[in-house]
Amino acid sequence: TNSLPVYSQEEVTKHCAIEKGIWVTYKGSVYDVTDFVAIHPGGDKILLAAGKALEPFWALYAVHEQEHVLEILSKYKVGIL
Ligand code: HEM
């Protein structure tokens, strides 16, 4: 099988800076989006969610409610919360 590691919220929270890596969570999965930050169409706003859940931010920025956005996110999955 190819089961991904389980991470604690504490571990995710540590990844909140470029030098430590930028991790986010979404619907119970963990994503390392460090390499996506520089190409995010919404610029540095993505850093507001660093080490945190995407849900409250994406609730405000409905532009993310599209299949192609979830497709991008899925490429960065590194684990389960
Ligand atoms: C736009 C991905 C986090 C704010 C976009 C778009 C993508 C994307 C693909 C373009 C959508 C389109 O126009 O079809 C992501 C991913 C994120 C993330 C993968 C997390 C890993 C955030 C966060 C915020 C944010 C946390 C705000 C706090 C925006 C804004 C735009 C945008 C304002 C619109 C930019 C414009 O068209 O001028 N994002 N985003 N994003 N994002 Fe994000």
Image (cartoon, rainbow, N blue to C red):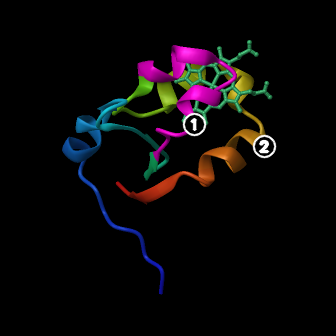
Query: In the image, 73: left or right of 62?
Result: left
Residue displayed at 58% across by 23% down: 59
> Ligand 1: does it lie within 8 Å of the C-beta at label 2?
yes
Q: Which of 44 and 51 is in front in this view?
A: 44
Tag 2 residue: 68
Query: Magenta segment, which residues?
Result: 32-48
Query: In the image, 65: left or right of 47?
Result: right
- Which one is closest to the eye, mark 2 or mark 1? 1
Image-quarter location of ligand 1: top right
Q: Where is residue 40 in the image (x, y as percent from the top left)?
A: 63, 27
> Ligand 1: does it lie within 8 Å of the C-beta at label 1?
yes
Q: Position of residue 8 (x, y in %)?
A: 23, 51
Quadrant of the frame with the C terminus: bottom left
Residue displayed at 41% across by 69% down: 4
Tag 1 residue: 36
For the residues marked 2 and 1, what is the alpha-carbon distance in whole angstroms?
Answer: 14 Å
Kind of residue sitting beneath label 2: His
Secondary-structure class at tag 2: helix
Residue displayed at 33% across by 33% down: 51
